Amino acid sequence: MRVLHFVTGGFSGATQVAVDLCLAAQRTGDQEVLLVLRRKRHTSNERVNALRAQGLDVRVVPGWLHLLTIWTLYRLCLSWKPDVLAAHGFSEHLWGRFAGLLAQVKVLVQVEHNTRERYRWWRLKQSLWLAQRSHSLVGVSYAVRDTLVRLGHPPDLCTAIQNGVDLDRWQPGLPWRDRETAMVMPARFASAKDHATLIRAVALLKTKGWQMPVYLAGDGKAIWRKRAEQLCESLGVTDQVYFLGRVSDLPALMARVKYCVLSTHHEGLSLGLIEGMAAGCVGVGSDVEGAQEIMASGQTGLLVPESSPEQLADAFARLLADDAWAASLAEAGCLHVRQTFDKRQMHQRYHRLFSTLLDRQPALS
């Protein structure tokens, strides 16, 4: 079975899922895979070459003009002849499936990665039209699947396959007592992420007498990082907030700190939060759909109302005041995510889906 994964070259969470699926297929040998990235202004040639060094067949298609993206991918489909085209994320799932239809790929699959995409009326109309010509619409969480149905996509085509992480890479790390009392937020700088609420909560904690290092791990858009840096300066917390950019060995960082936080406005299913919990951190997330499926608040982590620096500061004050309770949350959360969000399970579910669809349906015309 030949599977082509088409996804943004922005190296978002959607890119990571597509990469993980390709690497898993390469390891098991049950699929021949091709990873196609849509070039973005910040697509890193270094990261593309690093994927190729792992043995992946990676191609990059133009991204500045939609028709050119579709045409280039169409020509690639004609030459590579995939049995399945899985188009990940908005708006790549539109251009990917248009190309797949033109090339008469046997099975077309949309993979939606977020609960709040920018579906203006024309894009939504295109998505609904393509849904009638696709074989399956996959949400990376149950919340994302429900969002697809709510937008009018055919319920019988919509399914959920929860994201998974590489548990061999994300080990539980240091014992709790040996960990640094610090927090990591593993997230790119973007409008969907809420670094501002976290920074304000850190300032409030400081007034309560709690001060600890905060590591912001991720790249993203320079304008959002600049705003976060300016907010740190205005609130007087520049001495404890560290802007790390992209961290090459994030598992090592997660393995030595106590807290992993995701302050966000919306989420499909947060890989960063899952990874932090798998590495033994207490997971603290905004109470949005993409985090609610990861933890039970007060049992395997903590959920805090979105955009509330006061309540986020209170949550951390409680954790810092009761280290034994924090340790128990970390242990329970680690066990839960390692049982639930294994990349191997994710790959097996996609493989079964692709195989079933390929056996069941002829090519669409």
Image: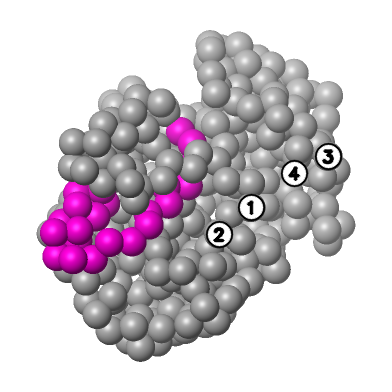
Query: How far apart are labels 4 and 3 at the CA level?
Result: 20 Å
In the picture of the structure, the residue carrying the numbered disc 1 is 249
Query: How far apart are labels 1 and 2 at the CA level?
Result: 7 Å
Looking at the image, residue 6 sits to the left or right of residue 12; the answer is right
In the picture of the structure, the residue carrying the numbered disc 3 is 53
Query: Secondary structure beneath disc 1?
Result: loop
Q: Looking at this view, is 315 or 214 the one in front? A: 214
- The answer to whether residue 130 shows anywhere in this view is no
In the picture of the structure, the residue carrying the numbered disc 2 is 253
Query: How far apart are labels 1 and 4 at the CA level?
Result: 29 Å
Q: Looking at this view, is 55 or 130 the one in front? A: 55
Nearer the camera: disc 4 or disc 2:
2
The kind of residue tagged 4 is Val
**Residue 24, position as x, y percentages in the image:** 75, 57
- Determine crowd level at label 1: few under 14, some 14-19, many 20+ residues with C-alpha closer than 10 A: few
Query: Secondary structure beneath disc 3?
Result: helix
The kind of residue tagged 2 is Leu
Query: Secondary structure beneath disc 2?
Result: helix
The kind of residue tagged 3 is Ala
Circle nearer the N terminus (3, 2): 3
In the picture of the structure, the residue carrying the numbered disc 4 is 3
Query: How far apart are labels 3 and 1 at the CA level?
Result: 17 Å
Circle nearer the N terminus (4, 2): 4
Q: Residue at x 70, y 68 (%)?
A: 168
Mark 1 and mark 2 in contact? Answer it, CB < 8 Å: yes
Residue 278 lies in quadrant: bottom right
**Residue 326, position as x, y percentages in the image:** 35, 81
Query: How far apart are labels 4 and 2 at the CA level?
Result: 34 Å
* Magenta span contains residue 211: yes
- Determine crowd level at label 3: few under 14, some 14-19, many 20+ residues with C-alpha closer than 10 A: few
Q: Which residues are magenta?
A: 198-220
